[in-house]
Image: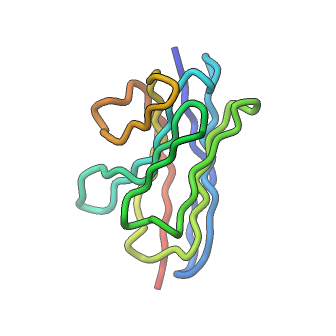
Amino acid sequence: QVQLVESGGGSVQAGGSLRLSCAVSGRTLSGYAMGWFRRGPGKEREFVAAISRSGGRIYYADSVKGRFTISRDNAKNTAYLQMNSLKPEDTAVYYCAADPAPLAIVVVTVSNYDYWGQGTQVTVSS
């Protein structure tokens, strides 16, 4: 069984930065493609960023491209989401997810992920 725990959320002003972490336990991170999703107030859960098992393939939602960076450290069993130039519309609960996809596959669909963290709140004020 894989457990995911997010951390690093908080409240920042517009233009600020946060780095979210997703600690994985129960299995080694290298066996999973990772993704970040978010659910804003009154909205559906939406894709933010994804990274393949090897880290060689990365994909971002258009809304965060150029501002957010997804990464992974398989040795530390942790995935990250660096968020810069935050906007009030980035306010949401952020979730990390893991999927035992093939090595070079990036997974962008909510339903394809097998494991989810509990979420961490990010609030951006104007």
Of 114 and 59, nearer the camera is 59
Residue 120, image x and y in percent?
51, 50
Residue name at image x 61 percent, y 59 percent: 82
Q: Quadrant of residue 105?
A: top left
User: Position of 44 compared to 1: left or right?
Assistant: left
Residue name at image x 42 percent, y 68 percent: 90
Residue that lies at the very extreme toward the bottom in this rendered image:
126
User: Position of 76 compared to 106: left or right?
Assistant: right
Residue that lies at the very extreme toward the top in this rendered image:
1
Residue name at image x 52 percent, y 81 percent: 14
Residue that lies at the very extreme toward the right in this rendered image:
75
Q: Is residue 111 above or below residue 11?
A: above
Q: How many marks?
A: 0
Of 8 and 30, nearer the camera is 30
Coloration of the structure image: rainbow
Q: Quadrant of residue 77?
A: top right
Of 1 and 101, nearer the camera is 101
Residue name at image x 60 percent, y 76 percent: 16
Residue 71, image x and y in percent?
62, 47
Of 80 and 61, nearer the camera is 61
Residue 38, image x and y in percent?
39, 53
Residue 7, image x and y in percent?
61, 47
User: Position of 115 compared to 44: left or right?
Assistant: right
